[in-house]
Image (cartoon, helix red, strand yellow):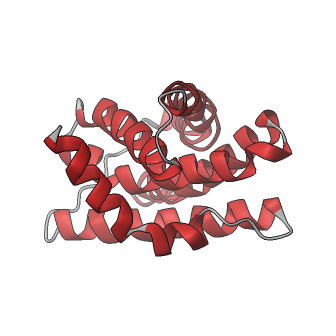
Amino acid sequence: MPVIRVLNRFQTKIEIFNGWLFRANNDPFFFSIQRGAIALLGSAIVATLFSIGDIEIRKANSEYLFAQILTLTLFAPLFENLVLVFFLELVNKCRLSITMVTLFSALLMSSFHAIFSFVWGVVILWPFYIFGAIYLTLRDLGKKKAYFLSVLAHSIQNLPPAIMLYVAERTS
């Protein structure tokens, strides 16, 4: 199958990076924060490349500003990472490498976001790859702990848009 061959070639090219990405240090909390920052940096670079000269910050509805910020930083990460974990566990049953499991699950999550905006789907592919890597790396500590640490990284990812919503509302 040609798709599998292409994916296998891609996998071998990122094994060095994954050796670092999937290696937890002694502190899972720090590991999650660090990988969350890497997810944010990567998506910020991609978002910048896609939005050169076309940055638009939607004005928040001031009545629901707190709810929107809470949704971005807490409820969305909890729900989306629950779906991601479901995909990770499901795809992991196919006996693929950890790289392919993570990549395929991130592609599924990205495709859901691309329904609303193709660019949005592309921008968040990288973060969902990182969130999946956090979960799979820390899963030996317990699935709940791994889940909540991936949620922490996701919340870090969503914090800048929440801050931009707040600033846009307060400066208008």
Quadrant position of the C terminus in the picture: bottom left
Residue ID at (79%, 34%): 144
Residue 162 seen in the current view:
no
Count the numbered circles shown.
0
Residue 65 seen in the current view:
yes
- Residue 50, given in percent of the width and then of the height, sits at 18, 63
Q: In this view, does 8 lie to the left or right of 60?
A: left
Q: Is residue 79 left or right of residue 111?
A: right
- Residue 149, given in percent of the width and then of the height, sits at 73, 48
- Residue 63, given in percent of the width and then of the height, sits at 51, 31
Answer above or below: position of 169 versus 79.
below
Residue ID at (74%, 50%): 138
**Would you identify the image quadrant in which residue 33 lies?**
bottom right
Answer above or below: position of 27 versus 115.
below
Q: In this view, does 22 lie to the left or right of 60?
A: right
Residue ID at (46%, 68%): 15
The one nearer the camera, 172 or 144, is 144
Residue ID at (28%, 34%): 111
The one nearer the camera, 160 or 84, is 84
**Would you identify the image quadrant in which residue 45 lies?**
bottom left
Answer above or below: position of 152 versus 39.
above
- Residue 38, given in percent of the width and then of the height, sits at 53, 69
Quadrant position of the N terminus in the picture: top left
